[in-house]
Image: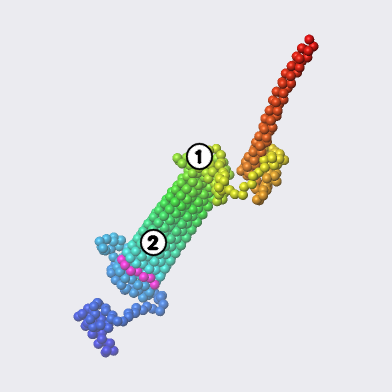
Amino acid sequence: MKKIFLAAIVCASQLATAQNVGIGTNTPASLLHVNNGTVLFSGPGAIPANISTPPVKGKGIRTFWYADKGAFRTGGVFNSVVFGFPEPDTSHFHNWDKDSIGFFSFAAGFNTKAKGAYSFAAGEASFATGVSASSFGHYNRASGNYSVAGGSNNIAAGASSIALGNGAVASGTQSIAQGNYATASGMSSVAIGTNVEAFGKYANAQGISTIASGERSTSLGDHTTASGDFSTAMGTYSVAGGDYSTAMGKTAKAIGYSSFAAGNNNTASGANSFAMGVNANTNNHSNSFCFSGALNDMATANTADNQMMMRFTNYTFFVSGSNYAYLLPASNGWAYTSDRNKKERFQEMNGETVLGKIAAIPFYSWNFKASDTRQYRHYGIMAQDFYKAFGKDDYGSIGNDSTVSPLDLLGVAYSAIKGLEKRTATLQEQNDRLKNELALLSSMKLEMRRLQDDLEAVKLKMKN
């Protein structure tokens, strides 16, 4: 007991003279200097029933271990000028008081608050008030349980939410807001960029001033809006307003249910409609397709439901590597590839045989089944008859027994025309020969008549 008392006197004497205490050193450099050793701060074995008051409260600069709550604080809480910036809010004086300290929490910096259990706050006036929340940086708020706020003036209010950047707000449960004034208020929503907003459940908004307000919607790019449920808007100033709709490109609008608009200034306003190209508009007609490649701001719009409309300055359709059809500008019909260099295995047709087969093919007037028989009647042949007559050559099959190709019809027609021309040439030759023979006979007849006249004249002279 005397030794302990003597040690206390020595320590008191040293504190009174040197004001520094050294452990493991005779030249302490601070009030408490532990050299080449460890320091242990221990608390109670369990959280006590009656939590004691921290040893100090209110404003001030300090570092302390709050054993009853297993919490740690370091930094300061006050309203004086810090780095030239005054802090007028005196409520921060109490950020490190008993009721503002969460169990097993950590707070460091200036006017920080870690009120939630297991929370973490660091920086300047950043608050972590939710359970297991983390807030770090400048004036951030992590109020949702398990939330994270980092950067400047961000708010993570939803449970398990994340807000990072500047002015970002993640208020939806399990939401993420990142960037400059990004807002994610829908459950499990994501907002990344500048002035982006994800309102719908599971919505995703990314870019600049994009809005995803529909459930499970996605808005990407610049000033795009996805307001329909399960909708997608991409590009710049595109709008996907219908449920299950998609708008892509510049000022594309997919307003109809399950509609699709892609390109420049296209509108798919009908349900299940499709608009693509430039200035294409399905014009509120359902199940319609509108394709436009027209120049000079010429608009193309559907005029009926279940309609396909296309407008281009030129058309080319490739069926395979060498087969294609196209429309030339200002033309009035399709042109088909017929380049000899793209063809092979030529077999010339016999015109007389073709004419005989054509003569055997029945020719009808008819209408399609379920059509108005008074209005939609047609003339033509049947594919089965045409295929039976012309469906085979020495190299293989041509067409099938349910369709007839216009090119095949033209080929047969030209072969028949050639056969008729051959017939005509033969008949012309025969006609010319007969005309010559007739002329000869006429000449001979005249000669015979002349001779007959001469004979009659001789007879008359002999008689006289």
| Residue 172 x/y as whole percent | 45, 59
**In the drawing, what numbered circle is on residue 164?**
2
| Residue 36 x/y as whole percent | 29, 81
Residue that appears at 39% across and 66% down: 134
**In the drawing, what numbered circle is on residue 275?**
none
| Above or below 406: residue 221 | below
**Secondary structure of the residue carrying numbered label 1:** loop
Residue placed most toward the observer, 54 or 436: 436
371 on left or right of 6 = right
**Secondary structure of the residue carrying numbered label 2:** strand
**In the drawing, what numbered circle is on residue 329?**
1
Q: Residues within 10 Å of mark 2 (few under 14, many from 20)?
A: many
Residue that appears at 26% across and 63% down: 83
Q: Main secondary structure of the magenta part?
A: strand
Residue placed most toward the observer, 76 or 393: 393
Q: Quadrant of the N terminus?
A: bottom left
Residue that appears at 56% across and 41% down: 334
| Above or below 97: residue 390 | above
Badge 1 amino acid:
Pro
Identity of the residue furthest to the top in this view: 464
Residue placed most toward the observer, 382 or 321: 321
Badge 2 amino acid:
Leu
| Residue 200 x/y as whole percent | 47, 55
Res 228 seen here: no
Place residue 437 in its image quadrant: top right
Q: Residues within 10 Å of mark 1 (few under 14, many from 20)?
A: few
Span of residues in magenta: 104-110
Q: Disc 1 to disc 2, how far (Cα)?
A: 56 Å
| Residue 103 x/y as whole percent | 39, 71
Res 246 seen here: yes
